[in-house]
Image (cartoon, helix red, strand yellow):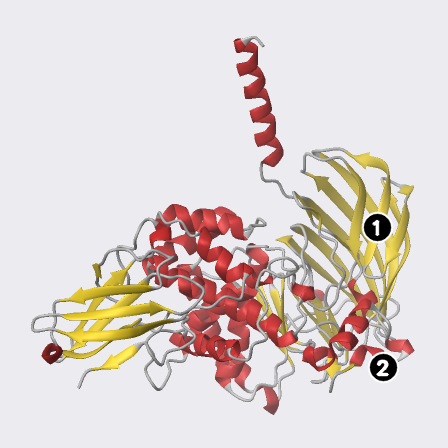
Amino acid sequence: MNKGFLIILTLFFGLSSAQKNAYYQQYANYKMDIDVDAKNFTYNGNQTLNYTNNSPDELKVVYFHLYWNAFKPGSMMDQRVASQGKNGDSRLQNNGISTLASIPKNEEGAQNIHWIKQNGKDLKFEIQETVMKVYLNTPLKANSKTTFTMEWDAVIPMQIRRAGRNNREGIDMTVTQWYPKIAEYDYDGWATFDYIGREFHAPFSDFEVNIKIDKDYVIGAGGTLENPSEVKGYDAKATIKTDRKDKATWKWTAKNMLDFAWAADRDYTVESFVILDGPKVNFVYQKSEKTIYWEQAKPYVTKFFQIMNATYGRYVYPSYSFIQGGDGGMEYGMATMMLGEAKTLDGLVGLMVHEGGHSWNQQMMAYNESVRPWMDEGFTSYYDDYIMYQLFPPQTPQPNPFTTSIDRYRNFVKRGIEEPAGWLGDHHDNGTAYSFATYYKGEMFLIQLGYIMGEQNLALVMKEFYNEWHLKHPTDRDFMHIAQKISGMDLKWFHHYWINTTKTIDYGIKDVKYGENSTTITLENKGTVPMPIDFSILTKDKQVVNFQIPLNMTHTWKTKDIYGDFQTMPYWPWTQKGYTLTIPYNKSQISALGIDFSKRLADINLEDNLVEVK
């Protein structure tokens, strides 16, 4: 082959490959008109969806989610709960019996599609419970747009999980994941996971939603209310504008969000306050003796947004609404649905901090939670602990903000039912194992990285990750690329051990020998996850002296850490079970010596980590 032609061919295919693998994301624009029959908990919907295919692929079908179809006896969600029994999600069962099995016929969830059209022409579609497959008359070419119109009606289901009517605190309607929602399409194809009760995924979208409902209702939603002077609750001087059926129309807009969620109740109070250099916050709740902590929570919520803006990245939306409703706490675009009758102030604030934190790790950093729930829940839990430690300092000083979570993980591992964090969210066999794999192992992932690379580097990683990937759909590979770039370390080994296995960390002090002018310590790796080790001594005069034992697999060692200066020792090969270090202190100079004085290492057995010298 001609050498020059070969070079041209190589450049061409190299460019084509780069273009094919370049990042892209789809875009959707929803315009909805909704007419609610509040008495019967139903509504009629009409929707125009302008959809942009920014992918390099021609699409011959599209998929929509119909989540409410899961809320009925015999559904896949019901079957999954029934098969798991007491090991399943406690919110979906009562003493091991699925609560979906007993939903009355008139309270079953339903999203009934009347018709769907593409550019005005009828389309064939088939409904596979919570997924609707739509066959396009005209394939949607790469980098082109199309318009879907559709009409449907829906039954708001019994309140069991997230959405529904008459929740246990008396909220009439929690309306979430409620409209035919186009599925995400990316390099991995269509995200068409059935709704079994876990999390959601969607393309970034703009919304224009008009909700017609009885004039006595107040609506809380994740968006901007465009006509507060015509509806109840948001403007003290409002003149409620109604139609012939005594209904008011609420006009909401939102831009660049994953979803639009709302709730409605006749007894809602709306309280708003603006955070300096932050969003406008709306509290939408039933004001009573049972919700007295909402007023006291305002300065804590203010501080929460300020800390997140400073440490992670700026909240990009104009407002955020904490709305009483749902079955616990669940995040949506610019809003949280949450139970409001808290027993303590810190309990209420903790819920607000966690669910509000999802605005970063579920909304702005829009992970595919069906595939990687540990990134959203785990990263959110990390900042949850970090912020609550500042808002409500513990009465007993702790070495770091994460000690309680690390202890819970350590105790859970001893139960022997752990499942890998890398499993698909809906496919965990045990509900408790899912929670620990997702919330605790995900949080522990960041805590251990801070231990490995130093907290200063981890802070830089988190900021750079946000700066590069907010309002996109990052994966753990994208995160690891940044973590390795900033730290200079090879961290792939840690990612694999921690996310794809249930192997554990267990280091101990095997032997201590005191000399005239020095002490020799032999350490032992008894676990199955290799790690670098921070080893310290406490001197008789109460000084802490730190030594870092690097792990050879990182190839570059951390150079600083907020938990103190340290001397770097020779590295510990991961294949080697024992390690010996000699320090220039004798027995008379040492009060205690041990592994990880900062208490960040997720070592499952602490009994042999510390030696007190007497």
Q: Give percent across and percent down for residue 297.
A: 50, 79
How many angstroms separate mark 2 from mark 1 (CA)? 29 Å
Identity, as a three-letter code, of the amino acid under mark 1: Lys
In this image, 17 relative to 451: left or right? right
Number of callouts: 2
Q: According to the image, label 1 marks what residue?
A: 133
Q: Give percent across and percent down for residue 339.
A: 63, 80
Q: Quadrant of the C terminus?
A: bottom left
Q: Residue at x 41, y 80 (%)?
A: 392
Residue 217: which numbered mark, if any? none
The image quarter in which residue 536 lies: bottom left
Helix or strand or loop: what does disc 1 sit on?
strand
Q: Is residue 322 in view from this perspective?
A: no
Q: Residue at x 67, y 37 (%)?
A: 55
The image quarter in which residue 265 lies: bottom right
In this image, 380 relative to 403: left or right? right
Q: Give percent across and percent down for residue 404.
A: 43, 79
Disc 2, disc 1: CB below 8 Å?
A: no
Q: Quadrant of the N terminus?
A: top right
Q: Residue at x 65, y 61 (%)?
A: 424
Helix or strand or loop: what does disc 2 sit on?
helix
Q: According to the image, label 2 marks what residue?
A: 102
Q: Residue at x 51, y 87 (%)?
A: 344
